[in-house]
Image (cartoon, grey):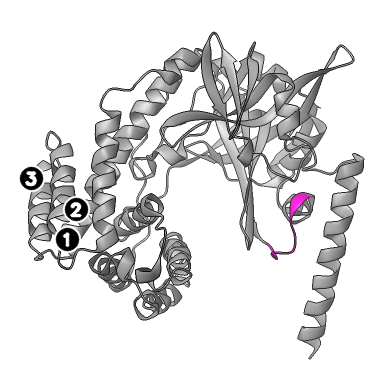
Amino acid sequence: MRVDLLTDAVDGLDEALAAVDGFDQVLVGGLLRPQPAQAAGLAGLADAVAGSPLAGRTAEAAEKTAAGAADEDHFLMLAAARTALLGSVHDALVERVEEAVGRPRAEEAPVPGAGAEHPVNLLAAARGWLCDLARAGWQGIDHELVGGAAPVVTAMLPEPALRRLATLLDGFAAELAASCPGATLERVPVRRWADLWSRAMLLTLPGADRTAAVTEVTGRLLPLGVDLHEHATAVQAQVHAVFEPTDGTTPRLVRAGVSVPKPDTVVGAGLWQLLRPHMSVLAAVSEGRAMELDAMPVTAEGDLIWDDARATPGEPADAFATARVALPTATAAPVTPVDRHPARIAVPVLLEGYTVEKEDDGLAFRAAGERLAVDTVRVPAAGPLTAEAVASSGACLGLLRWDAGEFLLQPLAVERTVRKKPVAVHAGAWAGGTADKAGVRAEKAATDAVTVLRERAGRLLRK
C-alpha cells in the first residue's frame, strides 16, 4: 500500500468541506430569521454546487432561505446540495484509496429497484417536523419541539417500508431530547446533527430509500475480521470478508452484519452471547475458517443477507493469508448515491513493513517515510486485541477510514513476534467462543448479568 498517496492533498477537498461546514453553522442558529453570517453560509453552499445540475434550484433555495421566505421544498434542496457535496468528497477519497491500495475500481452503483409505496402523509409529517427543527436551529430546540417526532415515529413503525426513516428519526429525536434546551448547550455536535437532518430530509422523498437489487451467490467466504459497534441499548457486528465465486469470476469484498438490542449492563465479551445465535460466521472468524455459501442473498452494495441455512463451515483459512493473496485482487462493491458519505469509508487493507510511533493521543505507523494514524479507540474491549498488541506488531490487517481531515487505520488484527514466531491477535477472536482465560472470565461475568436480568424479567412477567 502506498501510504504517501494517503497523505497527499486531494484537489477541491478543503473547499467542499468548508462549504459544508458553513451551511452546518447556519443550522446552529436556525433558518427562521437568518443573520448576515448565515446568509454567507447559504451562499457558500450554492456557490459550491454552481457547476452542477443542482445549481439553479440551490441558488434559489439559498436566496429564499436567507430572506426568511423558504418553504419545505427549499429546505429539501439545501439538504440535497449538502449531501451531493459530501458525496463528491466520498468519491474523491475512495478514488485516492483505490490508487493507494492498487485494487480494482468498483463498478458504478446500479439503479435501485422499485420500492414499496409509502404513505405520503407520513412522509410529509416527517418532513414538516424536520423543517421546524431547521427553523429553530440547534440552539432553539426544546422538549415540545423535539417531542413532535414521537407521533410521527409511532405511525411509521408499523410500515416496513418506513422503518429505516422511523429509526433514524427516533434516534435523532432522542439525541436532541437529551440536549434540551438547546440554548444552554456548551457544545453542539454540528456535523453529526446536520448529517442526520440532511439524510432524514432526503428519505422523506418517495423512492429515496429504494432497496438495492438482491442476487444470490455461491462460493467461498474468507473472513478478514469483525468490526464491532456498541451502543448503550444495541450492538452490531459486521464481518468483512473476501468472497470467491464458484464460477471463477473476480473475487469481491462483502460484509455480513447482525444487530441486536442489549441491556446496558452487558458489555465487553458478553456482547458475543447476544450476537452468536444470529450469525454462524462469527464462529468461523474465531476458528479461522472459511464458510461455504450456497445461494446466499447479497445486495449490489456487497451486504450479505445472512441465512445460516445457506452457509456451512469450510476449510481453515488464515485471515492474513487471505489478505496477502486474495485481498489485492478483490473488487469493492459500489455505493448508492444516497449512501455516499466520508464516514461510510471502511476499506479492508493490509499494512506491513512499518515502524510504530507512540504519540500523546495514540499510535501511528510510519511506512516508507510516511505517517498513518492508528485508530485504537475503535478496537473493542470484547476481544484480546489491545493498543499494546498493536504497538508491538509488524503487520496490521484493518479498515482504512477517513475522519477529522486525515486517513486512519482501524486495526482488526495484528501479527506480532513471540519467541521468534509470528502470532496473530484478532479483535474478533472471542466472537464464537474462547478458551482464553481473560475471555472466559469476561464471558462468565456477562452470563451472570444476563441470568440476573432474565430472572428479574421473569418475575415482572409473572406479576
In three-dimensional space, the C-alpha distance between marks 2 and 3, rounded to whole angstroms, equals 10 Å
Closer to the camera, 109 or 403?
A: 403
Q: Identify the disc placed on residue 73.
A: 1
Query: Badge 2 is on which residue?
Result: 77
Which residue type carries mark 2? Met
Query: Residue shown at 88%/43% (left/top)?
Result: 438
Q: Which residue is mark 3?
A: 56
Q: Position of residue 82 (x, y in %)?
A: 26, 46
Alpha carbon distance from label 1 to label 3: 14 Å
User: Picture coordinates of residue 330 (x, y %)?
Assistant: 54, 20
10 Å neighbourhood of mark 2: few (<14), some, or many (≥20)? Answer: many
Q: Image point 47% across, 28% down: which residue?
A: 407
Left or right position of 297 against 136: right
Answer yes or no: do the residues labelled 1 and 2 have beta carbons within 8 Å? yes
- Few, some or many residues within 10 Å of mark 1 (<14, 14–19, 20+): few
Q: Quadrant of residue 298?
A: top right
- Asked whether residue 372 is drawn in magenta, I would say no
- Please tell me whether residue 338 is drawn above or below residue 97 in the rendered image: below
* 249 left or right of 339 in image: right
